[in-house]
Amino acid sequence: MAGSDLFGTDLGRSDLSGADLHGARLDRAVIIGADFSGADLSGATLLLPTAVSSLSYDTSEAPRFRNANLTRARIVAHLSGADFSGADLTAAVFNHADMRGTLMTALRTELFGCDLTRAILRSTDLTGIVLRFAKMRQADLTGAVLVNVDLSKADLTGADLTGADIAGVDFDGAILIGTRGLETAKGLALARNLDKAVR
């Protein structure tokens, strides 16, 4: 399935664990409850997939990307509650910086309550996304771009922010116990609500 065009395909509840989907196009695909654990999604695109069946927040519908390879993937989506624990998201892009003039520019990626425990987010572009209540314990955010990210109430216990850009980040209520690299991170003076974080 590597390089497949799965635009609009219904993958709801599918077991795609360990699948080779590198370079695949999953734009507008239905991924409600789909399991991508351990899958190779490197270089894949997930633009505006359908991950919920209603406006209510139901974690049972959240897709799973546990230990998946999402290096250099492009994701613009609402994936609240999704499991990215242990996933490799190195150099992935979660915004629409090069899509100006399209519908994408009006959207904001939301990873509300997602599990990013021990995820690798080195040099990942997370500009402007919502990570409220996300579990990011021991996540590797080395060199990540977190400009204007909403990290309120997120748990970053033991996470590594060395070399990350945190200008405009909202840390209201975030747990920063044991977080490394925060004091030397880029844009520290522009971060918001650091005084309201748990440190």
Image (cartoon, grey):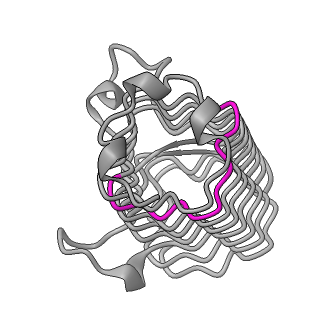
Residue 43, relative to residue 62: is it above or below?
A: above
Residue at the far left: name it.
55
Residue occupying the point 30% across, 42% down = 193
Q: Is residue 28 magenta?
A: no
Residue occupying the point 37% across, 43% down = 194
Residue 65, relative to residue 120: is it above or below?
A: below
Which of the 4 image quarters holds residue 132? Answer: bottom left
Which of the 4 image quarters holds residue 134? Answer: bottom left
Query: 64 or 145: nearer the eye?
Result: 145
Q: Which span of residues is magenta-colored?
A: 152-163
Residue occupying the point 61% across, 54% down = 179
Q: Position of residue 143 (x, y in %)?
A: 69, 32
Query: 124 or 53: nearer the eye?
Result: 124
Residue 193, relative to residue 134: is it above or below?
A: above
In the image, 138: left or right of 186?
Answer: right
Query: 165 or 93: nearer the eye?
Result: 165
Residue 111, relative to residue 85: is it above or below?
A: above
Q: Is residue 162 magenta?
A: yes
Q: What secondary structure characterizes most of the magenta part?
A: loop
Query: 89 or 2: nearer the eye?
Result: 89
Quarter the N terminus occupies: bottom right
Q: Position of residue 196 (x, y in %)?
A: 29, 51
Q: Position of residue 130 (x, y in %)?
A: 36, 48
Residue at the far bottom: name it.
60
Q: Position of residue 128 (x, y in %)?
A: 38, 34
